[in-house]
Every structure is written in structure tokens, then in C-alpha cells.
Amino acid sequence: MSKFAMFGKLTAVPGKRQELAAMMLSSGDTLSGMEGCIYYIIHEAEEEPDVLWITELWESREAHAASLQNEQVRELIGRCRHLIADAGGIKVKPLGGIGF
């Protein structure tokens, strides 16, 4: 199995990016210790006031898929849904580098 990564993009409802980021960050222990999660980092876009970027690295595609079935993760997604205007992202295959 090879590592699995994603760059996720969340566009918040106008003016709600800080609230969305705070909600996601306050639930950090949801992924802390989750099997297969190497990192999950939330970033603010500097030039897009409503956009958050999420970088994720998992031990495998299966570990990522299993996380989406976790009740705590599903509950967090449900709580954040009203703050999200659009969601997207790309799946990538990490090749290596510093920190990998």
C-alpha cells in the first residue's frame, strides 16, 4: 500500500471562514490518534477571504476512507455543513520530500 494525500478546498459561506476554521480546529482531537492519519492541516487562503485549504496525508487510501465512516468525523461534517458554500479538492500521490 502507498500513502494517500489530498488537497481539500472549502469555500465558506461569505464572512464565515473564521467560524468554520474555529469549528474544525476545535475538533482537532477527532483526528488525533486516528489510525492511519499522518497529518491533517487547515490553512487560510491569503487572497481568497472565504477559502480554507486542507492538506491531508494518510497511510493509505483505505485509512482515509475508514475515517469518513467514523461517527465523530461524520458528526463534525454535519455541524460544519451550514458554514460551507462549496467543497472540492484533488487526490494526489506523494512521491517523497522533506517531512515525508
Image (cartoon, rainbow, N blue to C red):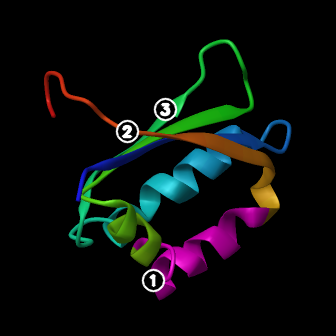
Q: Position of residue 76 (x, y in %)?
A: 57, 72
Dot placed on the residue nearer the N-terminal end, 3 or 1? 3
Q: Dividing the picture into quarters, in which one does residue 63 lie?
A: bottom left
* Residue at the image position 60 percent from the left and 22 percent from the top: 45
Between residue 55 and residue 45, name the one nearer to us.
55
Q: Is residue 97 above or below residue 40?
A: above
Marks 3/1: CA distance? 23 Å
Q: Position of residue 34 (x, y in %)?
A: 27, 71
Q: Is residue 65 above or below residue 51?
A: below
Observer-side mark, 2 or 1, equals: 2
Can you identify the residue that label 1 sits on? Answer: 70
Task: Give the position of the N terminus as an image quadrant.
Answer: bottom left
Is residue 14 visible from the viewing direction of this image?
yes
The 10 Å Cα crowd at callout 1, few under 14, some 14 to 19, many 20 or more, is few
The 10 Å Cα crowd at callout 3, few under 14, some 14 to 19, many 20 or more, is few
Task: Give the position of the C terminus as an image quadrant.
Answer: top left
Q: Which mark identifies residue 9?
A: none
Can you identify the residue that label 3 sits on? Answer: 43
Is 77 part of what is drawn in magenta? yes
* Residue at the image position 44 percent from the left and 65 percent from the top: 27
Q: Tell me which segment is drawn in magenta.
A: 67-81
Observer-side mark, 2 or 3, equals: 2
Identified by mark 2, the residue type is: Lys
Q: Position of residue 68 (x, y in %)?
A: 50, 73
The 10 Å Cα crowd at callout 2, few under 14, some 14 to 19, many 20 or more, is few
